[in-house]
Amino acid sequence: MRHAVTKEDQAFKHQVEACEYPVAEFDHRAHLRLAYVYLCAHGTDRAIRRMRDTILGLLRQAGVDPEGKYHQTMTEAWILAVHHFMNKTKCSESADDFISQNPMMLDSKIMLTHYSAELLFSEEARRSFVEPNLDPIPRHPS
């Protein structure tokens, strides 16, 4: 399995980490892109930590209260999902290439096939990771 990042992917990561990326443009696709870039360089545990720290920093820099916006279960579940799709995809030349090979990830509601809405949108799930209650997210060694 070979997954690569481009100079543009690296520049995107640096822009987000430096809190120079517009929060309003940090949509679901941008989350997937950053998850992919982190997973190309790190295992899932470190990618989760990096993603959490980066998102919290971006929110704080934009003056957004992280308590009301950040969601730990969503962050961790999407890292696991991207990692799963990376294991299913033989190779990708960039984050955009990877996403185009796995367009089902663009459906942000896919997590509702793993979690009930009641659990996913609970305060507990927002504060800390909770395991899916409908269908497990496949896990692969990092």
Image (cartoon, grey):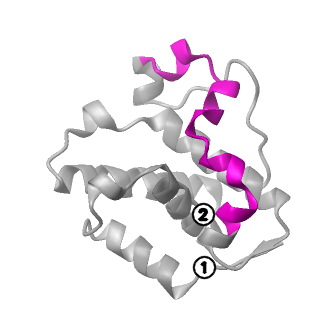
Please name the residue that numbered disc 2 is placed on. 36
Name the residue: 27% across, 61% down: 22
Say what secondary structure mark 1 lies in.
Answer: loop
User: Residue 101: where, in percent of width, then height?
Assistant: 75, 63
User: Depth check: 80 or 95 in front?
Assistant: 95
**Quadrant of the image occupied by residue 2:** bottom right
User: In this picture, is 135 found above or below 87?
Assistant: above
Q: Is residue 72 left or right of residue 35?
A: left
Q: Quadrant of the N terminus?
A: bottom right
Q: Quadrant of the C terminus?
A: bottom right
Give whichever of discs 2 and 1 has the lower sequence position.
1
Q: Residues within 10 Å of mark 2 (few under 14, many from 20)?
A: many
Q: Is residue 139 left or right of residue 77?
A: right
User: Residue 51: where, in percent of width, then height?
Assistant: 46, 55
Inspect the image, locate mark 2, and give the three-letter code of the amino acid beneath it: Tyr
Inspect the image, locate mark 1, and give the three-letter code of the amino acid beneath it: Val
Say what secondary structure mark 2 lies in.
Answer: helix
Asked whether the residues under the numbered discs 2 and 1 touch, taking CB atoms below 8 Å apart as contact, a structural biologist would say: yes
Name the residue: 20% across, 50% down: 60
Q: Residue furthest top?
A: 118
Q: Is residue 121 left or right of residue 112?
A: left
Please name the residue that numbered disc 1 is placed on. 5
User: Residue 17: where, in percent of width, then height?
Assistant: 34, 67
**Residue 114 seen in this snapshot:** no
Does the stretch in magenta take in 140? no
**Residue 45 seen in this snapshot:** yes
Name the residue: 51% across, 55% down: 29
Name the residue: 40% across, 28% down: 127
Q: Which residues are magenta?
A: 98-122
